Amino acid sequence: MIPSVANNSVSVYLGGLSCDPLHPFALDLNLNKPCSSASLFWNCKGRRKRENSIIMASSCRTNNFLRHVESMKLHPSGAGHISHLNAVILGESLATEEDDFVLPSEGFASQANVQSPEQYLKMYKRSIEDPAGFWSEIASEFYWKQKWGDKVCDENFDVRKGNIKIEWFKGGITNICYNCLDRNVERGLGDKVAIYWEGNEPGLDGTLTYTQLLHQVCQLANCLKDIGVKKGDAVIIYLPMLMELPIAMLACARIGAVHSVVFAGFSAESLAQRITDCKPKVVITCNAVKRGPKAIHLKDIVDAAIDDSAQNGVSVDVCLVYENPWAMKRVDTKWKEGHDIWWQDVVPNYPNTCPVEWVDAEDPLFLLYTSGSTGKPKGVLHTTGGYMVYTATTFKYAFDYKPSDIYWCTADCGWITGHSYVTYGPMLNGASVVVYEGLMVEGWRMILHGWHYHLLEEDKPRSHHKPRKSMKHANLREGLIPNRDFERKLNKLILLPSKSKCNFVQEALYRPRKSMKQATLTKAPNYPDAGRCWDIVDKFKVTIFYTAPTLVRSLMRDGDSFVTRYSRKSLRVLGSVGEPINPSAWRWFYNVVGDSRCPISDTWWQTETGGFMITPLPGAWPQKPGSATFPFFGVQPVIVDEKGVEIEGECSGYLCVKKSWPGAFRTLYGDHERYETTYFKPFEGFYFSGDGCSRDKDGYHWLTGRVDDVINVSGHRIGTAEVESALVSHPQCAEAAVVGVEHEVKGQGIYAFVTIVDGVPYSEQLRKDLVLTVRKQIGAFAAPDKIHWAPGLPKTRSGKIMRRILRKIASRQLDELGDISTLADPNVVNQLIELADS
Ligand code: WTA
């Protein structure tokens, strides 16, 4: 049966066809009912055109092209029936107009792990009706020393019925490292590449097979045991994306130690805070890391953090330091004899086999700190068994993983994405993973827009350079790099913020012209140029590429030519994570990067959820640009209103989850009460995600961003309270209120309203000092984009800051301020508006 055409309208996409729009009608487009209006899209010499009101009417005839639409009659998650036929496809699909479906090609769907909405619905239904049966079947594919007890899952999700408890596979004895490595070697994958490592410098790379990785993990595991690390002990890992980072995680897991990876962009203060909280036996780090031409001395940061935590009564016995010879020589590294150990001096001397510490499924695997609505980060705790089963399964289905795939996730292991989808999920599937040292964060990519810089030649002491000619920075604006020659020269230079006017010291080397628009600096993803990602994709023949919208937007701005000059023909699935992907970035990713051929898995999930929660299954159903689509197996998302009442069908509200899933976090380390208060008390009976979400008429989920005091900057969660407490620690800052504002590339930017102590004048220097304070206390990625001087803040009579008003002022939506009469002093609003551009 061909589905009926509701609303008398239909849209037809015709991709890659000839210019004659009527010609395709010779194809099998036959609908079962006349329709009075139709939109026809076609692709004419690369341009997309739209023609309305083409009348189609015809007899019925089923054909393959309508396969997906036909089977889209039912949706999960309470959305009921599909409301009307939105699109059918002939030929190749094109993502064009918002709210239209993009269908997977027939070729893709027929080879996919889940091939149709019916297949998904069948599996989804079973996962909800019989979670124990569904998940234990999957869990049986892993190695368990001893099977779990009678209860596959034991949970209390409702604070009214007692303490929150989530347990999966309790009593089952296993080890995730064994399942990632030994099991794969035993299955005959020993010679398969586990990690392709690519350095920040082009040409610097390395590989490890599963056997080699196992050996290296065992050596480190033996070393840690020798140092005295035992089951249940915490180990902090503060490393950049070297192969040693996943090695360290796996080594901890092998001996039952609890790793806590701290992103190597965090400051000494932030690291100290985490050390003080989890009291690790060992900190694993490296001496330095190169960010472009600059070496960041990570060991110095760790030293400062260890000193700091010692003052709080927490001492760390050992600091294990990997010598990163490309960044810094041993002799230049500050050293504490008796406390510091060079990795290379000791680890290779240990045997390359190490017995596994068998642990209970509910024993902790790792802690990962994440921002919350207070200044203190939350130690999200994940356990072993459920996390293992969940990350492996979500990886397999959401990326349609096949053993021949080469998979690249651009995330750093300092965040949850690097835990679940660089390390554990892929390796549990025996995948080959590309690990890229370069950081995929916009923060490293500075745009010379409105900035003043000195350009200094690398490797020469500063005094050699005297500014010779003053240039107006206006010549350097956002835009494209004019030519590769310019880039090459620029990449040899260090750019330093200048106090004076912009002076180009190396004018002999490079003389800016009017037409030169943008200087892109030395850091990935555009080091040495904006094509680096696609260079890596071609180099390793990457088939699955998983990244963040911020990266997509930033590369999109650099222009298509950086993409199209590479083949990318190996790509077959794309992925997005970290924040909502706006439809235009989605389309660029789909049409330009994926050549309108690769489905995009826009995966919604969180540190707390351990793995994907709402995600497309490529091949299973049509996509809508910007929608994370439908829940993964076993996940029951609900949208509630402010009273916590579940809303059905088409709606908007707060995103919650009913019932547990195996990958859920079990507690906040050392603070179960905060766990319950933050996540389970706001809407009793549900897990509250902190995100807003709407569901459209077809049941698709659209994430709308955080509804709490968390800002999502380039996919990094930053609590407004953390930034505020850093700001007020400055002696001249009396009060601060931080809000998020829309940012073209980063998704959200940090906007800080700052009240300074009486009598201190506003000054440019103070502004810089305040930004520096935040960089120092949290990390460069949390530096405010804007400091707005605020003689007073809009407060209610009870003293609560009205952030709603601040958000409107920050985004200059001054006609939407709403009612300000309830403020203790409404005049502050005008004052703030006047000072907006000061
Ligand atoms: C946001 C990252 C929309 C969301 C895995 C969530 C997203 C927070 C998406 C978690 C997505 C993540 N669409 N929003 N596909 N993925 N988010 O803990 O606000 O670093 O609550 O985990 O990122 O960030 P976290």
Image (tube, rainbow, N blue to C red):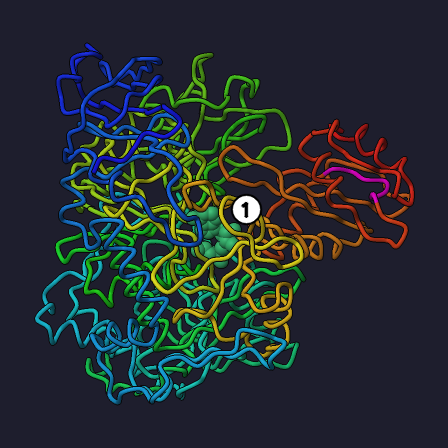
Q: Nearer the viewer, residue 364 or 521?
A: 364
Q: Nearer the viewer, residue 475 or 675?
A: 675
Q: Position of residue 321 (x, y in %)?
A: 39, 70
The residue at the point 35 percent across, 17 percent down is 37
Q: Position of residue 14 (x, y in %)?
A: 23, 22
Q: Position of residue 609 (x, y in %)?
A: 45, 64
- Relative side of 205 to 447, left or right: left
Q: Is residue 264 visible?
A: no
Which quadrant does the N terminus fall into? top left
The residue at the point 54 percent across, 45 percent down is 651
- Relative side of 54 to 745, left or right: left
Q: Is residue 323 visible?
A: yes
Mark 1: amino acid:
Gly
**Is residue 710 part of the magenta span, yes or no?**
no
Q: Position of residue 35 (x, y in %)?
A: 32, 20
Residue 128 in which image quadrant: bottom left
User: Please, is residue 483 above or below residue 772 in the view?
Assistant: above
The residue at the point 42 percent across, 46 percent down is 699
**Is residue 791 part of the magenta span, yes or no?**
yes
- Relative side of 518 to 225, left or right: right
The residue at the point 31 percent across, 59 percent down is 422
Mark 1 residue CB less than 8 A from any atom of ligand 1 = yes
SS label for mark 1: strand
Q: Which residue is mark 1?
A: 705
Q: Which residues are magenta?
A: 788-794
